[in-house]
Amino acid sequence: MIKCPECGSEDSDEDVKRAEICCRKCGVVIEENLVDMGPDWRPTNPGEINKGIRVGAPATPTIHDRGLSTIIGGNKDIHGGNISARSRAQLWRMRKWQRKIRISNSTERNLAFALGDLDRVSSILGLPRHVRESTSITYRSALKRKLIRGRSIEGVVAASLYIECRRSKIPRTLNEISEALRVTKKEVGRTYRFLSRELDIKLTPTSPVDYVPRFASKLGISIETQTRAIEIIKKAISKGLTSGRGPNGVAAGALYFASVLLTERKNQRDVAEVTGVTEVTIRNMYKMFVNNMNS
């Protein structure tokens, strides 16, 4: 609290318009010429008062020009009324040339195409915004170092997305990403290894535990069964049973095994469809757990 130098009172009042702090008891000006640390904007119409903002969106790597360019608006005048046909034709030509100006060279065309694909696939896979942004940065790094040559744009986008999902511990399989971008799993894997080597990206192995909540949610499995599946996986890891096996296959087998133990049995075909592995893999993992978990 600010203490009045005259009467010693701590009851003060801040006058924003005068930029002063005054004592409520004796009226002495305690401080003056205060600096306003609030947002630097002034509303010019009622809409801006309600929105509380007069600037555009922040810069983002998910747009090829980082969102710094402007966009020509709709076919209304300043009062919200319709404009003439001649003015609409002029606006159409202006928008056309503005779109061409925004993408002025091959690098920007490449980025615009790649980031458009990334935005579409991220929506399909339900990925958070921070993963989209980090994937955009990884792709930009690959483009800057000319690692795209000889490879498809979709393949590099898929590999960058897989890398950032691994970094963020958001489980998405190679199958899911390759199907969403319509490239082969082999191409995504090859490009992923190439980018990891050239960009010096160190990734820890994916844990099957990361896949359990997502698969269980899709299968409608209870929290108790999820917990048992995680315990089974951790025990299998400690015994070295998961070495060389795909994490999604281990997670699928553990979930099926746990559902059998807790009498919440799920159909093997349903588990296979959700987890992206074959029924044979689930049966093999189930047999492995049955033979080794009781020892």
Image: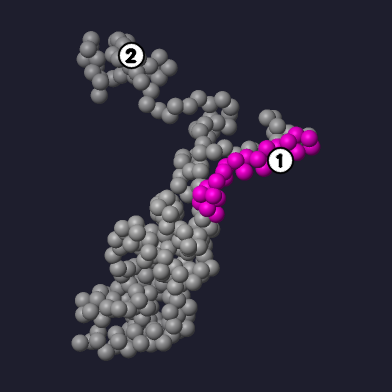
Quarter occupied by residue 196: bottom left
* 256 in the magenta segment: no
Type of the residue with mark 2: Glu
Instruction: Name above or below for residue 150 compared with residue 39.
Output: below
| Whole-percent x, y for residue 125 in the image | 48, 63
Left of 74 or right of it: where is 249? left
Cα gap from disc 1 to disc 2, whole angstroms: 53 Å
Which of disc 2 and disc 1 is earlier in sequence?
A: 2
Residue at the image position 47 percent from the left and 59 percent from the top: 149
Visible in this render: residue 219? no
| Whole-percent x, y for residue 201 in the image | 32, 59
The residue wearing badge 2 is 32
Visible in this render: residue 45? yes
Residue at the image position 48 percent from the left and 63 percent from the top: 151
Q: Nearer the viewer, mark 1 or mark 2?
A: 1
Indicate the secondary structure of the residue bearing disc 1: helix
Mark 2 closeness class: few <14, some 14–19, many ≥20 residues within 10 Å: few
Indicate the secondary structure of the residue bearing disc 2: loop
Q: Give the range drawn in magenta.
A: 85-113
Residue at the image position 28 percent from the left and 76 percent from the top: 233
* Quadrant position of the C terminus in the picture: bottom left
Quarter occupied by residue 20: top left
Type of the residue with mark 1: Trp
Q: Which colour scheme is used?
A: one colour
In the depicted view, which residue is nearer to us: 293 or 169?
169
| Whole-percent x, y for residue 19 in the image | 38, 16
* Quadrant position of the N terminus in the picture: top left
The residue wearing badge 1 is 92
Our reading of the magenta stretch's main secondary structure is helix
In the depicted view, which residue is nearer to us: 236 or 138?
138
